Image: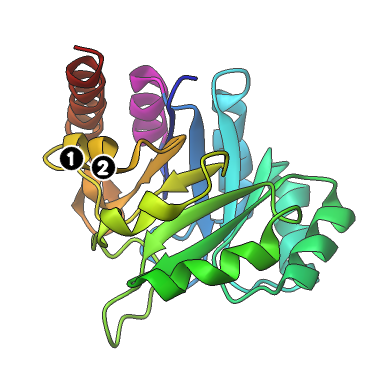
């Protein structure tokens, strides 16, 4: 199966265009006030139109209540919701039922035991995203540019659908794919020139590195 590639934290036409030109399968828009990648739902809805038919659009939230999610879904009409907070399996099921959209649940990983709660969400969430735990004192649950020990994923069920995230960039994607062989990858800060500022050249370079890594594995 082809590797899904999600460019997350998009805010501008140029960044979205670069992601689509590179071949992103998913593009993410973040709705979290503390994030430098935070975007207004109406603006995300405008950008979504350019992605229609080219990539799936993902609305990323952190412990958002129904009122916040209602506003995002109404303004943006995303293809998928990504829950990056402490949402319980029950909350994930509620969100899926309320909006009729697939849900990707995020788990923050530092050690093997951080993967155990995933079992509670199997059959509830449609997909998982495995990110690095944020550094101590960090205000952001993701997008911190920090990787985790990818060898921890060796014990995952072979059929588990997930995206690998956390500190990915053009320099380490070859190793990440070699160690984990994930169904999908997610990158945000690794293609930025400053927090929240996507760089078209870095996005292009990342896609080139992914293709090179895939060619190496095929050889």
**Local crowd at mark 2 within 10 Å, few (<14), some, or many (≥20)?**
some
Q: Are marks 2 and 1 in contact (CB under 8 Å)?
A: yes
Colour scheme of the picture: rainbow
| Residue behind mark 1 | 175
Q: Secondary structure at mark 2?
A: helix
Which residues are the magenta region? 13-23
Observer-nearest of 26 and 48: 26
Q: Residue at x 38, y 54 (%)?
A: 153
Considering only vertical position in the picture, is 90 above or below 145?
below
State left or right for residue 144 relative to residue 162.
Answer: left
Observer-nearest of 76 and 65: 65
Q: In which quadrant of the rendered view does residue 65 lie?
A: bottom right
Q: Secondary structure at mark 1?
A: helix
Magenta stretch, main secondary structure class: helix
State left or right for residue 88 relative to residue 205.
Answer: right
Q: In which quadrant of the rendered view does residue 151 lie?
A: bottom left
């Amino acid at each position: 199966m082809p590797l899904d590639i999600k460019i997350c934290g998009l805010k501008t036409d140029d960044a979205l265009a670069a992601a689509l030109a590179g071949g992103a399968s998913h593009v993410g828009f973040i709705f979290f006030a503390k994030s430098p990648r935070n975007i207004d739902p109406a603006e995300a809805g405008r950008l979504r139109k350019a992605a229609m038919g080219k990539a799936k659009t993902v609305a990323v939230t952190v412990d958002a209540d129904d009122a916040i999610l209602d506003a995002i879904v109404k303004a943006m009409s995303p293809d998928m919701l990504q829950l990056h907070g402490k949402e319980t399996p029950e909350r994930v099921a509620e969100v899926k039922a309320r909006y009729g959209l697939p849900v990707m649940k995020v788990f923050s990983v530092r050690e093997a035991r951080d993967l155990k709660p995933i079992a509670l969400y199997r059959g509830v969430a449609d997909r998982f995203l495995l990110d690095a735990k944020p550094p101590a004192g960090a205000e952001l649950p993701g997008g911190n540019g920090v990787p985790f020990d990818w060898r921890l994923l060796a014990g995952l069920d072979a059929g588990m659908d997930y995206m690998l995230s956390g500190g990915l960039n053009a320099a380490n994607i070859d190793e990440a794919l070699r160690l984990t062989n994930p169904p999908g990858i997610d990158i945000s800060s690794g293609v930025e020139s400053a927090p929240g500022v996507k760089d078209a050249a870095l996005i292009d370079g990342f896609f080139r590195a992914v293709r090179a890594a895939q060619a190496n594995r095929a050889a």
